[in-house]
Image (cartoon, helix red, strand yellow):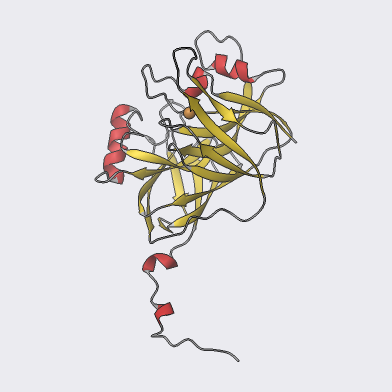
Amino acid sequence: MHRVVPAHHPSHRHHRGWQRPRTLTVWASNNADGSKDSYRLSTHWLRAGLVKVVLHNVGTFPHQAQLLKLHKGVTAASYLASLKATGGATALVLADATGGANTVDPGNHQVTWVNLKAGNYVVVCFQDGGDHGAPHFVDGMYAALTVVGHGNYARPRGRVQGTIAAYTHEATSSTPLVMGFHMPKVIDGDGLYKFENTAATDTHELAFLKLAPGMTAKDVVAFFNPGWVGPPPFTGDFGGAGALAPGARSWLRMNMAPGQYVAVCFIPDDMPPHMPHVAMGMAQQFTVT
Ligand SMILES: [Cu+2]
């Protein structure tokens, strides 16, 4: 028998957060010369818990959608002002990296999932492709986002095919500092994978580059250091998962054609001269089938 729940029943008085969506779709675009970049967001409110983040690059330069949770007292406006004043150097001083969809080439997309707690967030593109080389947040690729309510920790549906773990092994008296990725040597190009940051203090991201023929992860590291001669050893951005604070995790749906790829992290090191982690050796080659 059909049961009608009366309007005054407690189930009709959910916390308002319960009615907020749990999917954030971001369309990233730019004008012809790259002097203006912009996001369109499906929502500026999300419900706490497992959130699906979908990035569509509808522009003509590579773009990303990095989520960051602002520290108490930091507003979206003050954070942007600080990023602009410091060229992005305060990104992880005033906020925690909370995943998102990493950089994809024009026409491509990336799907990720992450558990978010209530708070004030921003979506930021730190890429600097364009006519004058400024990071895209300077040109408008920046948005505020609010997460409300309570959510239980959850993982996406579907079989997780493997784990990619970013790590930092701090230097000891007998071993050097090493950063890298523990990951399967062969990745399913449509598979669902977990990404976790096992470092104690470093923020790490997971970005995929396609290797140019004959090139290796060593070449990619060399490219981001002084002295590289010749064309880039990679041919494009194939997504990945946004940066995560130490101890955090997310999931991503791979979107790569078969071939040779490299996983890299561009987060600037917290120690001077603040080299991107990839230049310090954080690059791992893998095969996509
Ligand atoms: Cu890193």
Q: Is residue 219 above or below residue 121?
A: above
Which one is in front, 167 or 125?
Answer: 167
Q: Residue at 57% x, 24% y: name it.
A: 283
Q: Position of residue 288 (x, y in %)?
A: 71, 34
Q: Residue at 59% x, 36% y: name it.
A: 164
Residue at the limit of the structure toward the left, as seen here: 73
Instruction: Name the quarter where the N terminus is drawn.
Output: bottom right
In the image, taking residue 215 as reference, residue 154 lies left or right, namely: left
Q: Residue at 44% x, 59% y: name it.
A: 151
Q: Position of residue 132 (x, y in %)?
A: 43, 25
Q: Residue at 39% x, 36% y: name it.
A: 139
Q: Position of residue 15 (x, y in %)?
A: 37, 69
Residue at the limit of the structure toward the front, as seen here: 173
User: What count of labels does the image hold?
Assistant: 0
Which one is in front, 124 or 252?
Answer: 252
Instruction: Name the quarter where the C terminus is drawn.
Output: top right
Q: Position of residue 16 (x, y in %)?
A: 37, 68
In the image, taking residue 257 as reference, residue 198 lies left or right, namely: left
State whether residue 232 appears in this view: no
Quarter residue 95 falls in = top left
In the image, taking residue 270 as reference, residue 153 lies left or right, namely: right
State whether residue 20 appears in this view: yes
In the image, taking residue 193 as reference, residue 151 lies left or right, namely: left
Which one is in front, 166 or 44?
Answer: 166
Q: Is residue 3 above or below residue 185?
A: below
Q: Is residue 247 above or below residue 51?
A: above
